[in-house]
Amino acid sequence: MIENNELTMNTESRLSFEEFRKEVLNDYRLACESREVSLLARKEVLTGKAKFGIFGDGKEVAQVAMAKYFQPGDFRSGYYRDQTFAFASGIATPEQFFSQMYADPDLANEPFSGGRQMNAHFATPNLDQDGKWLDLTKIKNTATDMSPTAAQMPRALGLAFASKLFREVEVLKSFSQLSNNGNEVCFATIGDASTSEGHFWETMNAAGVLQVPLAVFVWDDGYGISVQREYQTTKDSISLAMEGFRKAEDTNGFDIYNVKGWDYAGMCEVFEAGIRKIRETHIPALFHVEELTQPQGHSTSGSHERYKTKDRLSWEKEYDCNSQMREWILENALADEATLLTIEAKAKTIAVDARKSAWNKYILPIREQVDAVLAHGKAVAAVPHTDKAMINGLLHELQINREPLRRDVLKTAASILFHHKKIKSSAVAELKTFYENMLKLEKENYNSLLHATGVNSVLNVPVVPAEYEEDAHSLNGYEILNKYFDQLIENDPRVFAFGEDVGHIGDVNQGFAGLQQKHGTQRIFDTGIRELTIMGQGIGMALRGLRPIAEIQYLDYLLYGLQPLSDDVASLQYRTKGIQHCPIIVRTRGHRLEGIWHSGSPMGMILGALRGMNVCVPRNMVQAAGMYNSLLAANEPALVIESLNGYRLKEKLPQNLDKFTVPLGIPEVLHEGNDITIVSYGSTLRIIEEALVTLKQLDISCELIDVQTLLPFDINHSIVESLKKTNRILFVDEDVPGGGSAYLYQQVMELQGGYRWLDVAPRTLSAQAHRPAYGSDGDYFSKPNVEDVIRIVLEMVEE
């Protein structure tokens, strides 16, 4: 006779086993569905319906196992082969995956980028339409993917570091919608070949130093495209190569785990324990997932059979993770053959249905546009004196196109209109209206949202003028900033400042002097000399609702951190179609000082690389403080370049230092005049002001304009209004010839139509093509000087 307690135990055991069995079969289902999606998606590329494909086949089981421990509130900073993880965690569906392959611009169908990114580039929103942060603790979050290899690593550090701050900084405890006491783990994924990138090594070193909850999964399939691992990685193993980073007792560093990518049970066991430890202790970990396969090769661009041996291909077939999981299920009597065949057949059906649905949603609006152009075109062809043969030929070509693109519709309509501009008829007018409306719609689909809009936009921040007491004190510029940052840190718990020498000594120019001692090492802190991951640290923090001020010590060293700013931050609004925001502020200093590496003004480089960020070039530190206030009132990223030689110049202290704002994109007229307009910014303004003294003595009246920001630039076109008065214009800049000065020239002459108001040819005055030589004479001969300004102005006035 079975005792009641024994019966209960047996019942619970059976229930437990049944739940385990269901979970395993569900995981196998996900792996099968993802594989079928990969196989079918490749065919869509090869038949021409999609342009390119890169898939996660061969990594399904590992990603299913990993996703089991990815909780609401966690963040992913991933690799473009993580489709199975996205499916398993609920971030994406197979249908959405296909919609992305077709580049569907409708966010309702492709919610990650509106067709702007390649497949397997996922994203989740972090702000709502009202500029309020979503409850990130209830979302399985992912930072949007990037294609540059290892580019996901620097920001992964910041996403994990934010958890450390949320757990340890008392003033952040009230932001419960952003973190659950710092329990969130950042899951970073990367292909083994990409661990050769410096991004990976710098991130791992910083994570080991900082001790942050970062889980790094390395997908190791033995190759980097066609190059074998032995030619890429020391000791032919990233985990062996990183042994010196392994955490031991009384050291920092990180844990290292090795698992086989086809061993479902082994991975579940290791991942569960490893992630739990990371979540509880904030000790980072590297999970080296070995012996993975890539059944379809690197991408749709070529075949892996060109570079893999027959033995390797045979091994990959045997150790395919899905096949190995199938055998394990059968061996452990978790299901019979019939059950697995049913799961596999249903997976094929789900993939096919997802493809069909995604394609129909993508193609239907285009076919409606085709029908509209056909109707309008036929109406035009019926009008007397039109070229009926040409029109009917164009319409026929469009009509027989089985897979038309939006551009095909627009090209057809445009061609008809171009050849019938002189025909006056309602049919032509209606086609023109249709064309213009469609062009406007598609520009919104493909050219919008480089910057934030609405309440998130810095352009919508109310202007609050600086106020001064009658007997306002004059302080050194660095003292103005010091007082400003003191008030800012005191009043806004979301703000953190960090970088090389920012903490203990208060930055090299004393903007934070004494503030670490006052506000603590968690709010203002030093970092290693690692500009790339300083940027990454700030990016991750900003994605999670904090307001980091991440410092690059000198503008010349921005190059080290430029890649994540350009590929990640600057393009973020655009490539997520406005669903994700990263309001990082990068603080640096540059322009005139001494020598090749400490007097940089590479504005052409910055303007080309950072479209999508605000670029502020304040002439003094009061202006800088007002710009910081404007930026912190919005949710947009910015680079603020303070003038190196302005820190010890006297300025009056505003009484509303922490509240006044400087509007971005609005130039300021510093000196009014009638003979010539001079446009510049930053430190060069002081050179020009010195020249103005002599020019005034020579009876030349100069209007001097400070653009204040390069991005955005003169949004109200006020500079051309000055040119209408003076009919002469000179752009002065200390970048190389054709750099920043060419940008200023293009904006005013072309965009604002300034050429219409010229009496003499416009001129630019820039630095030399070489880097600035060391010393005061080096500065004089390398960059624009007072005499240069006077000479060119005299030449222009005398023309």
Image: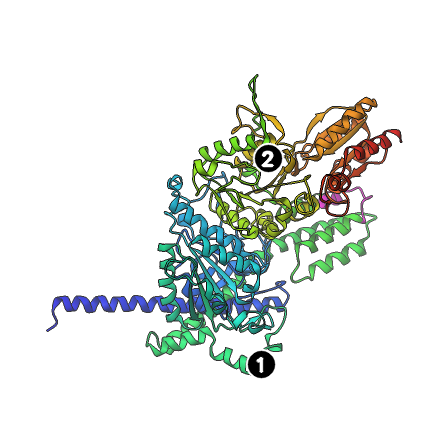
CA distance for labels 1 and 2: 58 Å
Viewer-nearest of discs 1 and 2 = 1
Query: Where residue 134 appears, x then y in whole percent?
Result: 44, 44
Instruction: Identify the image quadrant of the C terminus.
Output: top right
- Is residue 423 a member of the stretch shown in magenta? yes
The residue under label 2 is: 459
Q: Quadrant of residue 62?
A: bottom left
Q: Can residue 400 be seen by looking at this rendering?
A: yes
Mark drawn on residue 434: none
- Residue range in magenta is 419-432
Q: Mark 1 sits on what residue?
A: 309
Report the residue at 39% width, 64% height from top: 271
Where residue 70 appears, as percent x and y from the top left, is 40, 58
Q: Quick check: 78 left or right of 225? A: left
Badge 2 amino acid: Leu
**Mark 1 surroundings within 10 Å by alpha-carbon count, few (fewer than 14), some (14 through 19), many (20 or more):** few
Q: Position of residue 227 (x, y in %)?
A: 60, 72
Q: Position of residue 428 (x, y in %)?
A: 75, 45
